[in-house]
Image: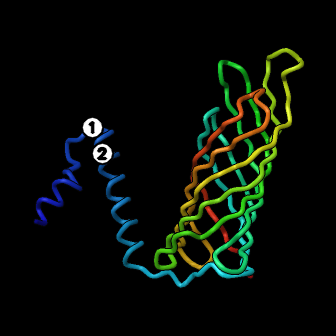
Amino acid sequence: MKMVIESTLFPKAMNQSGLSTFIYVFRLVVTAIIVLLFTQRCSAQLVEGQKAVDFGGGKSDIGLFANAGFVFYLPGKFSIRAGSFFETGNPYQFSYRNIGFDALFRYDLVNLYNILYINPQAGPTINYDHISPVKKAFTSSFNAGLKLGIEAEALLNEKFSFIAFFNQMVLARKNFGNQRYNYGLGVRLYIGN
């Protein structure tokens, strides 16, 4: 049995191409993370009054984005995240920039051993779009709408966690598209309660 597991999960890295070596190392890292998550108990818990800041980035339907936010934990399994984001890209060979702010109401749906949390989130978003070169009438636009998303958070200790997220925005104005998405990774730092 051990031989079968080793041969399927961990093929020999000798005489492998660069991509195969990367896949081998990736599998080792993922396996190590899974083992650590399920064998270690984190003493951290998300409690009322706790505060955190987070930073992240990733990919969107237009290009790349970065975000930062502040999380405040409410009674029960609820929290609020106020954040800002910047998105940039070159759709159809135009230069596109988007700056936005949002306030997301979150619910801790899943709590796995106080290590892994799954949080659906929703709230209002406000954006300022800028695209160039285009006719002057369509270069900039304010937009507002609703942001829906889900976040997975893996706590490493009482002060630090990794986050992965997917968000979908549905916006009122259609100048630059009224449905947009993004996904990415980030870190969250807890600053006390």
Mark 2 residue crowding within 10 angstroms, few (<14) / some (14–19) / many (20+) = some
> Which residue in the structure is indicated by mark 2?
21
Residue 40: x %, y % from top left: 42, 79
Q: CA distance from mark 2 to mark 1?
A: 6 Å
Q: Please identify the quadrant where the C terminus is shown.
A: bottom right
Amino acid type indicated by mark 1: Ser
Residue shown at 67%/42% (left/top)? 65
Residue 81 lies left or right of residue 15; in this view the side is right
Residue shown at 19%/51% (left/top)? 12
Residue shown at 74%/43% (left/top)? 86
Please identify the residue farthest to the right as the structure is shown.
137
Q: Please identify the quadrant where the N terminus is shown.
A: bottom left
Name the residue nearer the viewer: 130 or 112.
112
Residue 130 lies left or right of residue 155; in this view the side is right
Circle number at residue 17? 1
Residue 71: x %, y % from top left: 72, 67
Amino acid type indicated by mark 2: Thr
Residue 102 lies left or right of residue 152; in this view the side is right
Classify mark 2: helix, strand or loop. Answer: helix
Name the residue nearer the viewer: 79 or 56.
79
Give the total of numbered labels: 2
Name the residue nearer the viewer: 147 or 90.
147
Classify mark 1: helix, strand or loop. Answer: loop
Q: Quadrant of residue 158?
A: bottom right
Please identify the residue farthest to the top as the structure is shown.
135
